[in-house]
């Protein structure tokens, strides 16, 4: 059985991973520095944590379920315990992209991240419909990258990824650079910002007299049908009036050069801010 050392096992993300790894084929050794996190693991799963030295003794995989800002510090603190050939799994592209992993050519670096359950899905069970983050009951897609290491290590990394993010539908292989374009570029800089603008717009029409519940229902309903057409989830075209509103609305809302957020220097600057 493959042995995994899970760092940050009692944190918000690590707790999720601990649950999904519990009944897997992997032997997992849990490392958690906080007393609250250790207590949570013991209470919820009957898991007793161990030291980093014990966790990494003979481990083939080390999963760093810690915040982006701590990746470099944690990886640096354990690198002397990592034997050549060990796979280090990181759950976000930011720290690897920024160069925060130790310069060890004898280690494998594998990066994976969930896409989260899609808006357009076929979930019918109540717990799956409410699992909007994923990794519990709702199916989701994932992306993964073999940053460095032998090609044959990709299969093990993907198996770990499918286990910690389960249940998984499509598993996409990308590069670390492409993952950085997806996040923070696409998902946070663009999508999160525009959704925040949508919320501000909703609040604005409420401030101008529209009942709050009516405004929310109207917005979310239109997000559903407009999104289905734009992303080709169903056949359809917009009305002439809607197309004209888009034609005149986009210049009011978007700068002409907005796509520069995907330029390498902009992605790098965004990642520096969060790591």
Image: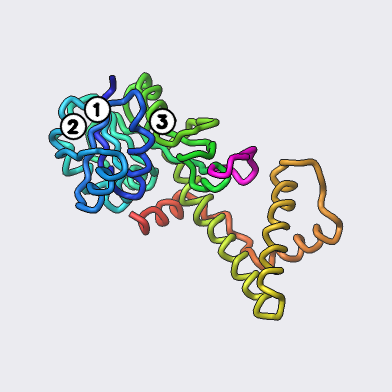
In percent of width and height, residue 263 lies at 50, 51
Query: Could you tell me residue 136's position as x and y percent?
Result: 46, 40
Q: Is residue 125 magenta?
A: yes
Horizontal arrangement in the rendering, residue 48 relative to residue 271 (left or right): left
Give the magenta part as a residue range: 117-127
Q: Which residue is mark 2?
A: 56
Residue 183 versus residue 152 in the image, above or below: below
| Residue bearing mark 1 | 86
Provide the secondary structure element on which disc 3 rests: helix
Q: Earlier in the sequence, mark 3 or mark 1?
A: 1
The residue shown at (29%, 41%) is: 64
Residue at image point 45% right, 45% down: 180
Query: In which quadrant will I find the N terminus?
Result: top left
CB of mark 2 within 8 Å of CB of mark 1?
A: yes
Look at discs 2 and 3 and give the one toward the viewer.
3
Near-viewer residue (42 or 62)? 42
Looking at the image, residue 183 lies above or below residue 108: below
Q: Residues within 10 Å of mark 2 (few under 14, many from 20)?
A: many
Q: Nearer the viewer, mark 3 or mark 1?
A: 3
Tell me, yes or no, whether the two marked residues, 3 and 1, touch with CB atoms within 8 Å.
no
Give the dominant element type of the magenta stretch: helix, strand or loop.
loop
Measured along the vertical axis of the image, is residue 73 above or below residue 150? below
Location of the C terminus (image quadrant) = bottom left
Q: Secondary structure at mark 2?
A: helix
| N-term mark: 2 or 3 | 2
Q: Check residue 66 in the rendering and tell me which mark sits there, or answer none.
A: none
Q: Report the front residue among 65 and 255.
A: 65
Say which element carries label 1. Answer: loop
Q: CA distance from mark 3 to mark 1?
A: 18 Å
Hey, which residue is sitting farthest bottom in the picture? 208
Label 3 sits on residue: 163
């Amino acid at each position: 059985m493959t042995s995994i050392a899970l760092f940050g096992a009692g944190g918000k993300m690590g707790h999720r991973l601990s649950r999904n790894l519990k009944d897997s084929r992997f032997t997992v050794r849990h490392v958690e520095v906080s007393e609250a996190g250790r207590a949570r693991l013991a209470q919820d799963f009957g898991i007793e944590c161990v030291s980093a030295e014990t966790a990494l003794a003979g481990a083939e995989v080390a999963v760093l379920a810690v915040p982006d800002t701590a990746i470099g510090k944690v990886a640096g603190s354990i690198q002397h315990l990592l034997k050549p050939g060990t796979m280090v799994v990181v759950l976000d592209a930011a720290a690897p992209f920024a160069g925060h992993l130790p310069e060890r050519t004898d280690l494998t670096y594998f990066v994976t991240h969930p896409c989260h359950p899609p808006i357009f899905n076929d979930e019918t069970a109540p717990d799956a419909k409410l699992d909007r983050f994923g990794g519990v009951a709702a199916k989701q897609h994932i992306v993964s990258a073999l940053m460095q290491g032998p090609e044959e290590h990709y299969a093990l990394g993907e198996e770990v990824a499918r286990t910690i993010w389960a249940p998984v539908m499509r598993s996409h292989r990308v590069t670390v650079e492409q993952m950085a374009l997806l996040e923070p570029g696409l998902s946070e800089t663009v999508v999160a910002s525009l959704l925040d603008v949508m919320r501000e717009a909703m609040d604005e029409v409420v401030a101008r007299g529209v009942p709050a519940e009516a405004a929310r229902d109207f917005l979310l309903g239109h997000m559903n049908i407009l999104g289905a057409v734009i992303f080709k989830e169903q056949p359809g075209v917009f009305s002439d009036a809607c197309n004209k509103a888009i034609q005149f609305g986009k210049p009011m809302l978007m700068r002409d050069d907005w796509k520069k957020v995907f330029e390498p220097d902009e992605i790098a600057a965004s990642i520096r801010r969060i790591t």
